[in-house]
């Protein structure tokens, strides 16, 4: 077990080293151009969720089983505590679906893991902050390495470029396909991996009132994202019927990805 866990930690560190070297303003802008048109494929949401079975997240030291299990676990955890909020349950189910980028040859360091803003100083709350940004050109660029960098105080996270990954991608897919998930749910999707913000209270100098109003929802979501990772695997086939009805309500039919 010690050996396997050691290997996992190495894998996680390696993923973050690559991410923190190559996620720059220029790179993120390039990814927006590449993915925001949602012209890669057409697929229903349930098919997208099940396709995650082919993926093991290389940034996650806790889970060594397929992502679709985590999707159903998260959704069921939310359903227990929030039986009246169908949109919240659905967000639990779909929150990691953006990871399908990894199945289309996007490297994992541009898909998984914790996110952070680019274009301003990399804060100390970013995982492995001290020893993984040394080769990131933005870290030495006076335009980008100050507290505010290219941003205005309290400009709002909507105006901040986040490191590219599955959060931002799925948010863009939701908007592109005009899905009916409320703003609270969209924030959960877009910022659930932004740990420096929702778990460490960093980057408040970039937030506006709307961000602060949404933060408790992102924190509430995070409880289920983190603490439903058990090896007690759900009966996916039975659950699919219920969650298909939610998909049909909020993001129906064939979506563009």
Image (cartoon, grey):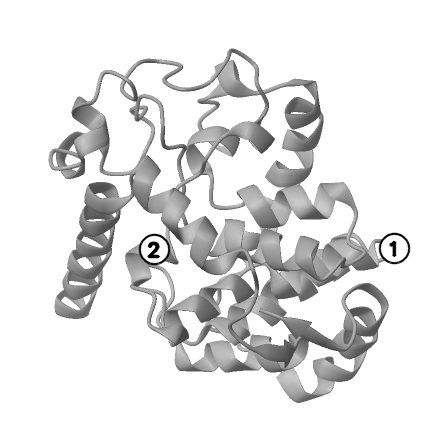
Residue 183, x across and y down, in percent:
75, 42
Badge 2: residue crowd in 10 Å (few <14, some 14–19, many ≥20): many
> Is residue 226 visible in the rendered structure shown here?
no
Q: Nearer the viewer, mark 1 or mark 2?
A: 2
Residue position marked by numbered label 1 in the rendering:
84
Above-or-below relation of 171 to 143: below
Residue position marked by numbered label 2 in the rendering:
110
Residue closest to the eye, 232 or 157: 157
Residue at 40% x, 52% y is 31
* Disc marking residue 124: none
- Please state the total of marks drawn on the protein image: 2
In-image side of 137 versus 212 (left or right): left
The quarter of the displayed image where residue 71 is located: bottom right
Above-or-below relation of 131 to 235: above
Q: Which quadrant is home to the C terminus? A: bottom right
Residue closest to the eye, 191 or 168: 168
Contact between marks 1 and 2 (CB within 8 A): the answer is: no
Residue 25, x across and y down, in percent:
34, 36
Residue at 70% x, 25% y is 210
Residue 74, x across and y down, in percent:
61, 61
In-image side of 136 versus 222 (left or right): left
Badge 1: residue crowd in 10 Å (few <14, some 14–19, many ≥20): few
Residue at 77% x, 53% y is 181
């Amino acid at each position: 077990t010690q050996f396997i866990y050691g290997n996992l930690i190495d894998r996680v560190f390696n993923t973050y080293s690559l991410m923190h070297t190559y996620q720059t303003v220029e790179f993120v802008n390039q990814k927006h151009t590449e993915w925001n048109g949602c012209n890669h494929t057409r697929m229903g949401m349930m098919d997208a969720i099940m396709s995650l079975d082919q993926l093991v997240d290389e940034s996650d030291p806790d889970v060594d089983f397929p992502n679709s299990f985590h999707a159903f676990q998260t959704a069921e955890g939310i359903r227990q505590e929030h039986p009246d909020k169908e949109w919240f349950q659905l967000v639990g189910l779909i929150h990691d679906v953006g990871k399908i980028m990894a199945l289309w040859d996007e490297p994992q360091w541009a898909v998984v893991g914790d996110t952070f803003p680019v274009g301003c100083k990399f804060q100390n709350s970013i995982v492995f902050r001290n020893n993984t940004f040394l080769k990131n050109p933005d870290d030495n660029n006076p335009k980008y390495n100050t507290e505010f960098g290219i941003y205005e105080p309290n400009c709002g996270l909507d105006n901040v470029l986040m490191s590219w990954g599955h959060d931002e991608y799925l948010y863009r897919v939701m908007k592109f396909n005009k899905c009916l998930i409320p703003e609270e749910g969209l924030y959960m999707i877009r910022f659930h991996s932004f740990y420096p913000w929702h778990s460490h209270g960093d980057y408040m100098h970039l937030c506006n009132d709307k961000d602060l109003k949404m933060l408790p929802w992102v924190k509430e979501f995070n409880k289920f994202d983190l603490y439903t990772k058990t090896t007690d695997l759900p009966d996916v086939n039975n659950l699919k019927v219920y969650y298909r009805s939610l998909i049909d309500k909020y993001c129906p039919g064939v979506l563009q990805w």
